[in-house]
Image (cartoon, helix red, strand yellow):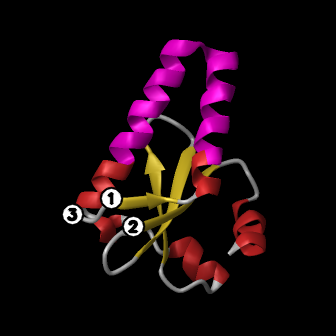
Amino acid sequence: MKPAFIRPQARADLRAEIVYYRKHAGNSIASRLVDAADDALRHLQQNPGTGSPRIGQILDVSGLRSWHVSGFPLIWFYFERKDCLDVVRLLGERQDILSILNAKL
């Protein structure tokens, strides 16, 4: 198992999603989001190689992987490092993911 190091921007992304869901869908859905995001990270900690490398390949960013948050249109983006998962972003499927990641990585 590799611990997840969640970068500040990924934490801010998650906080913004929680606020959005709390405002537009209510506290119970926002709480489900927290649980689903945690479950996704737990899965990755136990199985770091299961995330898709496709976005990393498109952007030519070696090692970048992605994993969907079950039940929500959200995707964790991370790198598998020797001793941890380096979680860099949590983005929505409808965002311009390529532009956002290309500008920040």
> For the residues marked 3 and 2, what is the alpha-carbon distance in whole angstroms?
10 Å
Residue 2: horizontal and vertical position, in percent? 27, 65
Q: Which is more toward the observer, 51 or 6?
A: 6
Residue type at the position of mark 3: Met
Discs 2, 1 touching: Cβ within 8 Å: yes
Q: Which mark is residue 44?
A: 1
Mark 2 vs mark 1, foreground winner is 2
- Please report whichever mark, 3 or 1, sits nearer to the chain's N-terminal start: 3
Secondary structure beneath label 2: strand
Residue 45: horizontal and vertical position, in percent? 29, 59
| Residue in the picture at 76% in, 58% down | 96
- Please report whichever mark, 3 or 2, sits nearer to the chain's N-terminal start: 3
Q: Main secondary structure of the magenta part?
A: helix
Residue 44 covered by magenta stretch: no
What residue did someone put label 3 on?
1
Discs 3, 2 touching: Cβ within 8 Å: no
Q: Image quadrant of residue 39? A: top left
Secondary structure beneath label 3: loop
Q: Which mark is residue 85?
A: 2
Q: Measured along the vertical axis of the image, is residue 65 above or below residue 44?
A: below
Q: Measured along the vertical axis of the image, is residue 73 above or below residue 29?
A: below
